[in-house]
Image (spheres, rainbow, N blue to C red):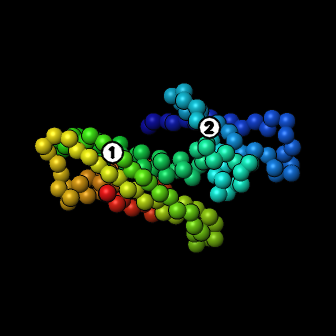
């Protein structure tokens, strides 16, 4: 089975630590070599201790679900002979308390807008079916308990 890695790096940089006022900026380096600036969400840790321009874990969670869904959708559309010109998803994630009282990403809403090229376009029912199949095949969606809904635009 495939094995995936990421290196998460944070450095104190000679600032106090035990007062809990350290900066949450860090880096994510992926197995392909790209490094992404990351930080705690400014919704969780206020600026200036977080960096709102960096990717936070909650955003990455939403993006990974959306990206996985998109890749499956494109594959399904191609196999069915549809030509996708563009795919854009303004995905949203919602935090909330779960039954144990802990905070969790409780809901992810995917809002994909698909534009097709050529003469062949799926009916609304066909496109909904492709999104359902993509959702069922998505490794990330199959790995979480979060409610994930798809609302094609």
Residue linked to disc 1: 87
Q: Residue at x 60, y 48 (%)?
A: 56
Quarter of the rendering occupied by the C terminus? bottom left
Q: Is residue 145 visible in this depiction of the protein? A: no
Q: Position of residue 17 (x, y in %)?
A: 84, 45
Which residue lies most toward the left here?
Answer: 119
Query: Image check: 153 left or right of 63?
Result: left
Q: Position of residue 98 (x, y in %)?
A: 57, 69
Q: Are marks 2 and 1 in contact (CB under 8 Å)?
A: no
Observer-nearest of 50 and 29: 50
Q: Residues within 10 Å of mark 2 (few under 14, many from 20)?
A: some
Does dot 2 land on a helix, a strand or a loop?
strand
Q: Position of residue 149 (x, y in %)?
A: 39, 61
Query: Is the residue 73 above or below the residue 107 in the image?
Result: above
Whichever of callouts 2 and 1 sits on the residue coming sooner in the sequence is 2
Instruction: Classify residue 83 by image quadrant.
Output: top left
Observer-nearest of 68 and 100: 68
Q: Residue at x 52, y 62 (%)?
A: 94
Instruction: Classify residue 78 by image quadrant.
Output: top left
Query: Is the residue 53 above or below the residue 100 in the image?
Result: above
Quarter of the rendering occupied by the N terminus? top left
Q: Residue at x 85, y 36 (%)?
A: 14
Query: Image check: 103 left or right of 121?
Result: right
Instruction: Give the tally of numbered discs.
Output: 2
Q: Residues within 10 Å of mark 1 (few under 14, many from 20)?
A: some
Query: Image check: 66 left or right of 52?
Result: left
Instruction: Classify residue 129 by image quadrant.
Output: bottom left
Does dot 1 land on a helix, a strand or a loop?
strand
Q: Residue at x 71, y 54 (%)?
A: 46
- Alpha-carbon distance for marks 2 and 1? 25 Å
Residue linked to disc 2: 37
- Which circle marks residue 8 in the picture? none
């Amino acid at each position: 089975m495939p094995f995936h890695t990421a290196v998460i790096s944070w450095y104190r940089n000679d600032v106090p630590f035990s007062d809990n006022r350290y900066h949450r900026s860090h880096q994510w380096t992926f197995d392909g070599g790209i490094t992404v600036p990351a930080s705690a969400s400014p919704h969780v840790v206020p600026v200036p201790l977080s960096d709102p321009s960096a990717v936070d874990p909650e955003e990455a969670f939403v993006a990974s679900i959306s990206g996985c869904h998109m890749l499956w959708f494109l594959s399904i559309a191609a196999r069915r002979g549809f030509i996708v010109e563009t795919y854009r998803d303004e995905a949203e994630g919602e935090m909330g308390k779960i039954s144990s009282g802990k905070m969790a990403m409780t809901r992810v809403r995917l809002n994909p807008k698909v534009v097709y090229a050529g003469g062949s376009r799926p009916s609304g029912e066909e496109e909904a079916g492709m999104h359902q199949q993509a959702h069922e095949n998505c490794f990330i969606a199959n790995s979480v308990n979060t409610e994930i809904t798809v609302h094609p635009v």
